[in-house]
Amino acid sequence: MIQTHCTFRNALLAAFFVFIVALASFAEGAEKTLTIGIALDVTQGTLSSRSPFTLTDRSGKKLSVQRSVVFSITKPGTILVGKTPLALPVNISGKSPLTFEKTAYRGSLRLVPSKSGVNVINVIGVEDYLRGVLKMEVNPQWPFETLKAQAIIARTYALKHAGRHRDQGFDICATQHCQVYRGVNAEDPRSDKAISVTKGMVLTYRGELALTPYHSDSGGVTADVASVWGGNYEYLRAREEPFASGSPYASWESSFSERELTDAIRSLGVNVGNIVSLTPENKDPRGRVPRLLVQGTTGSASVSTHQLRMALGPTVLRSTVFEIYGSSRGSDVPSVSPPLPAPPQANPPTESGTNRSLASGEDLIITLTQEGAFSTEELMDMLLHPEKRQDYVQKALSRNKRPSLPVVPVPSAPVTPGQAFHFRGKGWGHGVGLSQWGAKSMAEKGWTCGQILDHYYPGTSMKKVY
C-alpha cells in the first residue's frame, strides 16, 4: 500500500513538473524551453562536469559534487548518490555542461521516477537543443541555405511535438522517434551559425505551427501524407523535385524471400498464408506505391507499403518508390542491398574550394541514423570515437547486406512459394515533406531557404516566434 502511494505521488509530481515547464515554455516572446528524454528506465548512471555541480531533491536537500558521481536506485522514489539518499525528482545544475554517461548536455538535467528506474531528462532552451540535433540530421558541409531550412523545420518539429512524451515526464525523446539529439557532442560551427541566423523562425499554417516531417531522398517526387500516415494536410501533398538530387540513394535494389515477406506481413497482423504475389494497388505517376495487394495461399489482403517497409527494415526496403519483379531463384538465395558507395577523396576540389563530396562518409551515417540503423550506444560511440565510424557503417549495412540477384523483368509477376521477390526502387525515407538531398540540390542551384521551404511545404509561412 505504501509503495502504491509513493508510485502515485511520484507520477503526480512528474506530471506537475511537465505542466509547469509547458507554462514556462510558451510565455509570449520568450525562447521556449524543452524537456528531452535522453535515457529511460535507468537504474544507475554516472554524472560529471568540468566544474562543480549541485543536485537538489524533492525536499530541497542539496548535494554538491566536485567533478563526478555515480547514482543508483535504492527503492521507489529514492536514489543513492554516492552515499547520500535523495528523494525524486532530483534537479542537477552547474556552470559547465553536464555529462551523463559520456555525453555532455547544455542546460540542466533532471531525474524523474519511471516504471522501473528513473528517466534522465535534459531541460534546455530550443536553440541549444537544435545545436545537438542539426548535425545528426544533415551534413554541416552542405550549402548554407540547406542548413537554414533544416534548422527552421527542426525547430518547428520540436515545438509542434512538445508534450509528445508527457506521460513519461518530458516533451520529446532523443531518438529518431522524435529527432536524433546528442547534446554538445554533436555540435558543429556551421550548423550553429544556421541555427543562430534563423533564431526563433518556424513554419506556420493558418496561424498554427505546421507539421514539418522530412526525409533523406524522395526519389523524384515526395509523398502525400495521407498515403503514409493518414490525415489531410494541404501543404503535405506530393511534390515533384525540380532538379535531380545527385543522391547516392537515387536508385537501389533489394530482394526478399517468400518467408521473409510472409513473416513481415504477419508482424502487421495480416495472415494470408505463404505469399504468392505482391501487386501495387495504385501508383502515382512517378512510381510511388502507397498500398500493396498481397495474395497468399489462404487469402488476400491490402497492406500499407510504408508499414511493410518498416517491418522489412527501412535500410533495406529504402522507400515506397519501386517496381516488383519475380525471380527464378529459390528462397535460399539471399536478398540484395545496394553496394556501399566508394570512399570519398580527401578534400576533393570544387569550384567553391569546399569539400562537398561527402556522400559516402557523413551523409551515409546521417541517413542510416535517420532510418534507425544504429543503436543509441553505437551513435554515442561514433560521436566519441570518430575513427570507429566506418566500422559501424559496415556493421549496419552488413546486418541487411544482400548479394546481387539476376532480375527477370516481369513486373508484379506471381511468384510460386519458395521463390524470391525483387524490388528496384528510388530514394530513401518515408517521402513526406522536405527531401534533404533535394534541398541540397536546390541550394546548389541558387535557391534560398525560403524558396526551398515554399516548395516542400506550399502555403506555409515563416514566422519569428521569439
Image (cartoon, grey):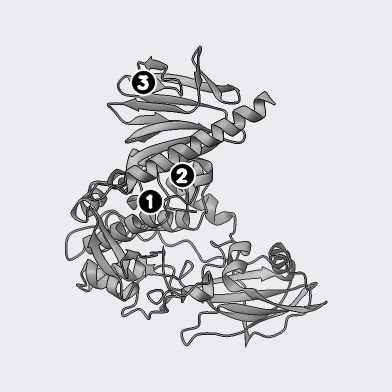
User: In the rendered view, does 246 fall on the left or right side of 113?
Assistant: left
Q: Which residue is mark 3?
A: 54
Crowd tier of the residue under label 3, counting other residues whose Cα lies within 10 Å: few below 14, some 14–19, many 20 or above = some
Q: Which residue is mark 1?
A: 136
Q: Quadrant of the N terminus?
A: top right
Q: Quadrant of residue 271?
A: bottom right
Q: Quadrant of residue 381?
A: top left
Nearest the viewer among 210 and 190 is 210
| Distance of label 1 from label 3 (alpha carbons) | 30 Å
User: In the rendered view, does 270 fall on the left or right side of 33?
Assistant: right
Marks 2 and 1, the one that precedes in the sequence:
1
Residue 453 drawn above or below residue 118: below
Is disc 3 placed on a helix, strand or loop? strand
Residue type at tag 1: Met
User: In the rendered view, does 278 fall on the left or right side of 296?
Assistant: left
Q: Tell me, for residue 236, which label it has, or none.
A: none
User: Contact, CB < 8 Å: mark 2 with mark 1?
Assistant: yes
